Amino acid sequence: MNSRLHSFFSALIILICLSSYSFSQEDPSGSIYIILDSSGSMWGELPDKSRKVETAKKVLKEYVAGDFEGYELAFRVYGHRRKGDCLDSELLIPFGEPDQVISELTQSIDSIKPLGKTPITYSLQEALKDFGDRQGEIILISDGIETCDADPCELVREWREKDVKIKVHVVGLGLDEKSKAAMQCISDAAGTEYHDASSASELSEGLTKIKEEAAPVERKKEPKTHAALIIIGVDSLGNKIRVEGTVIREGEDSIEVSSNGRNIIKGGDYNLEVGVLTRNGNLYKPVTKPITAADSGETKVEIVIEVPPSVKAKFLDGDKVQRGSQIYAYQDGKKKAVFKFRPQDEVYIDEGTYEFRSKPNEENDLSVTESFEAGDSKELVFNMVHTVHIYIKMVASGTGELYRENYELRKDGKKEYLVHISNGARVLPGTYDLILPNRLFWYTKEGVSISEEDEQEIDVTVPTGYITFVYNNADGTRDKDDRVFVTSVSLENGTVPRYSKGIFKNGGEKIPFLPGKYSVGGWAHKSSKGDGTYQDVEFEVKEGDDKEVIIKLKPN
């Protein structure tokens, strides 16, 4: 289907959707519809190194556990089931009163695992159907732009022109500047404020502002048949602490509960069992208590629990604190870790003795053994061997063009480090041979010194000449550009890789070479006119060259 026809049908679908609904002229209010991005990129990290998906889940659960009296809530997710599917958008929680949907909504948030694409436009179209004759707010939380060949800005603009009484609010999570502009386009089209978030606190702040803009409506209340159980966990000093566990009554299955938000249960008598959930996956010394939940409204239960041992960690390079890396805890000589945690976290754990391991880089494979008893709160210290972060730029002489390769640092012919073209590497200070490991040649800069300075950039100019490969017909006219196959014959300032049999390059483009001798063969072999075949050509490159190499036709 050509692009014009595709655009026509897309517009037609939008108009059909719009014409299927009647829209009130009153101010939008009373319904909040959350759309959460669960595309694969949500596994990415925010500046504080927390994963976007975990931050979004944590903040969103706290947000929906707040006071939404007078609202209806609904929840949709996209990109969570299938890779590459632009129709992967699912309404997990249809509109309902907060106290009726909060428990299931929280469970739905917990179950999300990012996977696929970002079908924003399709999700908004489906949301419009879900609203029916309601009015209210859509909150779109996304870490990326539309990836399904559609324009959400145009759709929202269409809604506004049709006086659709649904406002679309956008919260961008960890976006770069280009993506921010694209997402702000949706807010601009909707006439709402764009909210940018790079942390949990900023995401929470953005959601709170949106809620403040949305006014609840008075509805006729149906008699409530469910009670809300509010659990307040405290330690022996009265400090609040998060607890988890179950409530159960005779003849029924247990219900999972926590102190994080409202737990929806029927009124009646229960046995409550809660404790602090440790990183080991166990409830620490759970406390059991009989409770009676009211038939309606909130039943608050305060319960005193024992606090398990806790652990946190820091990484030191001398007296300087370093970022470190994920920490894994092992017990009893087993190969599989019992749990893991990040350096910035403080986590509760079971009592016992652990070996904690972490490997921030190749030079620091670290281990600390520590024992924990009831009431312990300890900080692990990982003392690191001093390494420095280096960035390397190897550029062509004359032009300054960057050789886009991952470089190697070697000592006595042995590779010590691979240095990424963009991210660099952490290495031990010292003197190395720096290698540009191109498939046609290896250029070596000997005796490169790396100092004790924490961050350093090493710039190396590589002697370079430029060649453009040109195909010529038998009559001397230029044939169309095509691929060529180049092999190294000998080099002045480098080494031909033993494993290299040559490399394909594009004709008609200026290509950098080390000084030396090479051979090039035509990829097509036959001319486009069919009047001969192309023969191999040997050529020499000198530093500063900028010339053409003609691949000549050998007549039939």
Image: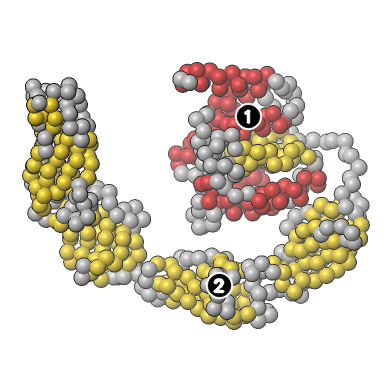
Quadrant including the C terminus: top left
Q: Which mark is residue 248?
A: none
Q: State the SS at label 2.
A: strand
Q: State the SS at label 1.
A: helix
Residue 287 position in % (x across, y down): 80, 71
Residue at the front extreme of this rendering: 556
**Residue 102 in the image: above or below residue 268:** above
Residue 537 position in % (x across, y down): 9, 39
Instruction: Report whether residue 176 is seen.
Output: yes
199 left or right, relative to 230: left
Category of crowding for the residue at label 1, using alpha-carbon neighbours closer than 10 angstroms: few (below 14), some (14–19), many (at least 20): some
Q: How many numbered circles are shown?
A: 2
Residue at point 81%, 47% (across, down): 99
Residue at point 77%, 58% (across, down): 256
> What residue is shown with label 2?
329
Residue 407 position in % (x across, y down): 27, 57
Q: Which mark is residue 125?
A: 1
Q: Nearer the viewer, residue 222 or 148?
A: 148
Q: Pointer 1 and pointer 2: residues touching (CB < 8 Å)? A: no
453 left or right, relative to 449: right
Residue at point 57%, 79% (across, down): 332
Measured Cα–Cα span from mark 1 to mark 2: 47 Å
Closer to the chain start, of discs 1 and 2, is 1
| Among the 4 quarters of the image, the one containing residue 499 | bottom left
> What kind of residue is marked 1?
Gln
User: From the viewer's perspective, is the residue at label 1 or at label 2 nearer?
Assistant: 2
| Among the 4 quarters of the image, the one containing residue 248 | bottom right
**Residue 301 in the image: above or below residue 519:** below
Residue at point 66%, 67% (across, down): 281
